[in-house]
Amino acid sequence: QNEKTAVLNIASYGPAAVCLEASTWSDYSSGIITSASGCGSGFLDMNHCVEVVGYAFTDGSNSNNDNNSKSHSGDGEDDGKREGYWIVKNQWSTYWGMGGYAYVSMGDNTCGILNDMTQVYM
């Protein structure tokens, strides 16, 4: 799935179940997980499923906080490579990550987040 379609689907239909590669996530506590974290992005690398509940675009300053977020909803615009992150809910308890959530970088199919995104809509 391409990223523009994924963003439009999350904006239109809501959260999505995603299977990805999370072997490096056990020590995650905050910030944005990037492809440099060491997780794989291949389809056969999948080893964990989570829920993508939203996304945010950033101004591109590479800061790991919310102060530079532009949007938490989709407007359908596509200006090339995205600067932003997926908001991911994990089931490893609220003690993991940021209250049970993680931010996963857009733009590089980080940890294979775009490989197997599934949604139900009516």
Image (cartoon, helix red, strand yellow):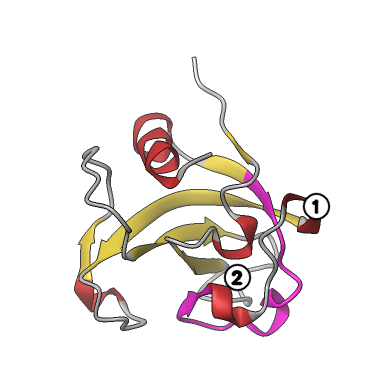
Residue at label 1? Answer: 44
Left or right: residue 14 versus residue 1 is left
Whether residue 47 is visible, yes or no, is: no
Helix, strand or loop at label 2? It is loop
Q: Distance of mark 1 from mark 2, alpha carbons? A: 28 Å
Neighbourhood count class around disc 1 (C-alpha, 10 Å): few under 14, some 14–19, many 20 upward:
few
- Give 103 or 100, whichever is nearer the viewer: 103
Residue at image coords 76%, 72%? 23
Residue 117: quadrant of the picture: top right
Tell me which amino acid carries mark 1: Leu
Q: Nearer the viewer, residue 52 or 63?
A: 63
The numbered mark at residue 21 is none
Residue 103 at what x, y percent from top left? 47, 68
- Element at label 1: helix
Q: Is residue 10 left or right of residue 49?
A: left
Check disc 2: other Cα within 10 Å, few if <14, some if 14-19, many if 20+. Answer: few
**Image: 66 above or below 75:** below
Q: Please, is residue 122 above or below residue 14 in the view? A: above
Of residue 35 and residue 88, the one placed in the foreground of this image is: 35
Q: Is residue 72 shown above or below 31? A: above
x 27%, y 42%: residue: 74
Q: Residue at x 42, y 61 (%)?
A: 107
Which residue range is magenta in the image? Answer: 18-34
Pair 1/2: label in front = 1
Where is mark 2, residue-wise? 94
